[in-house]
Image (spheres, rainbow, N blue to C red):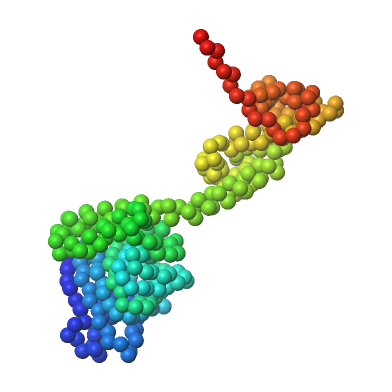
Amino acid sequence: MTEAGVWSTRGLAQAAAFDAWTEKMSELHLAWSLSFPKQERFEAAVRYRRLDTLTIADFRGGRFAGRRPAASQPGSERLVGVLMNLSGRLVCRYAGEELFVGPNDLLVWDSELAEGFDGVEPHREVSLLLPRERVPEGLADGASGFTSAVCAGAGSGLVAVAAHQLQAIARELDHLDDAGLAITCQAFFDTLDAALAPARQRPARRARESLLVRLRQYIEDNLDDPGLYASSIAAAHGISVRTVHLAFAGTGTTVSRWIRDRRLRVCYRELARGGAHQTVTDIAFRWGFNDMAHFSRTFKQAFGVTPSGVLSRGYVGDLPPKPAAPARKRR
């Protein structure tokens, strides 16, 4: 079903204008309880297009505020909205936060978390609404986690490109057929999804970094445990083995290699500070190595010297750098 129109309060008596606008907002946006400064003359206009469950609207209005009812309307559908503010300033109350939206700011929001807004000055916005299940999954999930609007002005990269796409769609509403409108809206959502991916990923990245710190500390505290493996680390933290491996995935090493390298460094330190009462075998077995040939080989690969060489020299200090590869002979 396609529906398009232009509507304004022009020609309406002031007593009826605001009630009519409230009804139009409920039809094209959400069911808001609206209010406006009584001492001001209220004017508003909207140009819109609806295609099936998609609604695009170019709103212009004076100062007014909206509050959501305490409970959603029966049978109301969960929506994801995109607000591109073109002029004026808004304060949006969303998920318990106050979000300030200025000119050239873009906000993605979830209808279940929208609480209210204040148009602190006359403003113009382009709004797009779509059922949550029809929005790209990452963008739909991110809508409930965004805590601020993003700048969509020049210099903001993909966000600016997406904002220009949305404004172009609004500008060409009367000139796009249904297929063209669907294609351009899909392109807009794909661009916006890619543009906002880093913002969505930051909390997840911080969580992974925090987990990695905890895992490394646990490894450090249990290096002498012969049963220290990815599976035992996962069990100690109540996570899957896959999650342990993923935590190390961006570090350039694996969990097993990290354990081995940390054990080798501890062995080097003990060998360097050891005395006649210490043996290479004692130290290697104490720190989880049970194959002396393998231990000696990996130790020399790491430090360029044998374990017995470190023990006999009695070196104390920082670990030496790995020796450079020998230069090739000229022919």
**Is residue 158 at all visible to an observer of this figure?**
yes
Q: Nearer the viewer, residue 134 or 20?
A: 20
In the rendering, at what x and y percent does residue 301 appear? 63, 24
**10 relative to 147, above or below:** below
Q: Nearer the viewer, residue 12 or 211?
A: 12
Q: Quadrant of the N terminus?
A: bottom left
In the rendering, at what x and y percent does residue 212 appear? 58, 46
Residue placed farthest to the right in the image? 277
In the rendering, at what x and y percent does residue 287 appear? 72, 33
Q: Nearer the viewer, residue 128 or 291?
A: 128
In this rendering, position of residue 193 left or right of residue 204: left
Q: Residue at x 38, y 75 (%)?
A: 117
**166 relative to 69, above or below:** above
Q: Residue at x 20, y 66 (%)?
A: 49
Q: Residue at x 54, y 49 (%)?
A: 208
In the rendering, at what x and y percent does residue 127 appear? 29, 67
Q: Nearer the viewer, residue 116 or 315?
A: 315
In this rendering, position of residue 213 left or right of residue 55: right
In this rendering, position of residue 85 left or right of residue 312: left
